[in-house]
Image: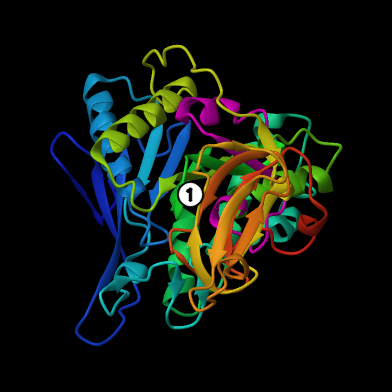
């Protein structure tokens, strides 16, 4: 046990990692729960509330921790599991005028889920002469190089230190899952194209209604910073066997108001069954549920934006299948006395599932109101950052 760990009776080993103090007389720490033997394989890392105002995953990890504690007690936990139930103490403290503002750092460094270290180049320089013909040896080599590169990576300012701390906890994991939620949504998953269909069991087990694939989604979010180096290195060194050895994904647990004990228990059980299927625990994972969606490209997501300000009404709900041309939102100008002129109908630009929409009913020009996951790439989604900030 590390010097900064304590053991909870019948539960996890609890580690508290110091973060920069925001002001004199205050302290800030990141709390980590560890299950299983340190260094055991497979290693799974799960975190919640990186966007600190997105809370469904917090309850899910608490429920999962109880499930893991039972597995640990029963001797069926084969691998190591690291949980970070509240991944963003900085964002949690940003309570302004009665509202939690946990998506962006108020001190100016931007979205907490952007700007993670891109380690592919540094790791490639470290390992190029040492790669061999054995995939397992190459995976171990890359993991050591990832850890080494992070040990030398600079961090200035509290958000940068937080990003680096989270990366160090997860960078050598076999599985890394970042739990988020959208505004109003059905459960959906973002993951790397190179991880498909490897990650199909994750999406099916969770009952995802959309699974969105990309090699580069824009902004280097947490999951892509962990998974991306593996497929970048495989492209750089095509002569050597180098599988995508970190299954990294962002799981959007419905909408921000879906903070519910029933959802939490169900999602935690699904995650535990997934971990069993991947060998982290030796219990029977039970039959895999049938998939509820096909994987589609992130470039196929129709991001339907407000062309003007006004009050929003939605004729369609998250989870509904829509055809191209279907009305999915209506913006009403409350100051236009002409009923017909006051209404602007927004229509789907692709066939697919409407998987998310904005909860705020006051639209602002350019705001993304509705997201529809289509199967074909869209011309206006080919370049630039593909995720909303």
Is 46 on the left or on the right of 76, as rendered? right
Q: Quadrant of the C terminus?
A: bottom right
Residue 89 sits in quarter: bottom left
For the record, the magenta segment spans 196-224
| Residue 219 forms part of the magenta stretch | yes
What residue is disc 1 on? 170
What residue is rendered at 83% in x and 54% in y? Answer: 379
What residue is rendered at 53% in x and 72% in y? Answer: 333
Kindly give the residue lying farthest to the left in the view shown: 9
Q: Residues within 10 Å of mark 1 (few under 14, many from 20)?
A: many
Q: Position of residue 243 (x, y in %)?
A: 70, 34
Residue 115 visible to an observer of this rendering:
no
| Residue 21 forms part of the magenta stretch | no
Is 163 on the left or on the right of 380, as rendered? left
Q: Is residue 230 above or below residue 368?
A: above
Q: Position of residue 137 (x, y in %)?
A: 66, 34
Residue 342 visible to an observer of this rendering:
yes
Q: Position of residue 282 (x, y in %)?
A: 39, 17
The residue nearer to you, when weighing 91 against 95, is: 95
């Amino acid at each position: 046990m590390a010097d900064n760990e304590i053991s909870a009776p019948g539960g996890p080993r609890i580690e508290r990692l110091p973060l920069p103090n925001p002001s004199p007389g205050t302290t800030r720490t990141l709390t980590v729960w560890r299950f299983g033997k340190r260094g055991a394989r497979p290693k799974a890392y799960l975190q919640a509330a990186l966007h600190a105002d997105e809370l469904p995953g917090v309850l899910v990890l608490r429920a999962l921790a109880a499930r893991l504690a039972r597995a640990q007690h029963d001797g069926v936990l084969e691998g190591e599991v690291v949980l970070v139930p509240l991944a963003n103490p900085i964002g949690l403290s940003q309570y302004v005028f009665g509202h939690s503002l946990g998506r962006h750092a108020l001190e100016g460094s931007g979205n907490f889920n952007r700007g993670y270290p891109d380690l592919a180049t540094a790791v490639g320089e470290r390992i190029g002469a040492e790669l061999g013909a054995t995939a397992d040896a190459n995976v171990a080599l890359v993991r050591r190089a990832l850890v080494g590169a992070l040990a030398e990576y600079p961090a200035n300012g509290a958000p940068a230190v937080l990003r680096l701390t989270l990366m160090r906890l997860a960078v050598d994991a076999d599985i890394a899952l970042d739990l988020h939620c959208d505004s109003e949504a059905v459960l959906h998953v973002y993951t790397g194209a190179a991880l498909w269909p490897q990650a199909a069991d994750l999406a099916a087990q969770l009952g995802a209604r959309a699974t969105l694939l990309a090699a580069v989604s824009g902004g280097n979010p947490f999951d892509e910073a962990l998974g991306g180096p593996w497929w970048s290195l495989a492209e750089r060194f095509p002569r050597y066997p180098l599988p995508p050895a970190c299954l990294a994904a962002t799981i959007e647990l419905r909408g921000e108001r879906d903070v519910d004990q029933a959802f939490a228990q169900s999602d935690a059980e699904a995650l535990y069954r997934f971990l069993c299927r991947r060998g982290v625990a030796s219990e029977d994972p039970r039959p895999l549920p049938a998939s509820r969606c096909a994987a589609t490209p992130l470039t196929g997501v129709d991001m339907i934006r407000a062309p003007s300000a006004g009050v929003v009404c939605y004729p369609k709900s998250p989870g509904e299948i829509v055809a191209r041309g279907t009305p999915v939102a209506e913006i009403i100008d409350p100051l236009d006395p002409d009923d017909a002129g006051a209404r602007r109908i927004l229509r789907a630009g692709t066939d697919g599932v409407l998987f998310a929409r904005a909860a705020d009913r006051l639209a602002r020009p350019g705001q993304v109101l509705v997201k529809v996951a289509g199967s074909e790439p869209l011309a206006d989604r080919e370049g630039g950052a593909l995720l909303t900030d």
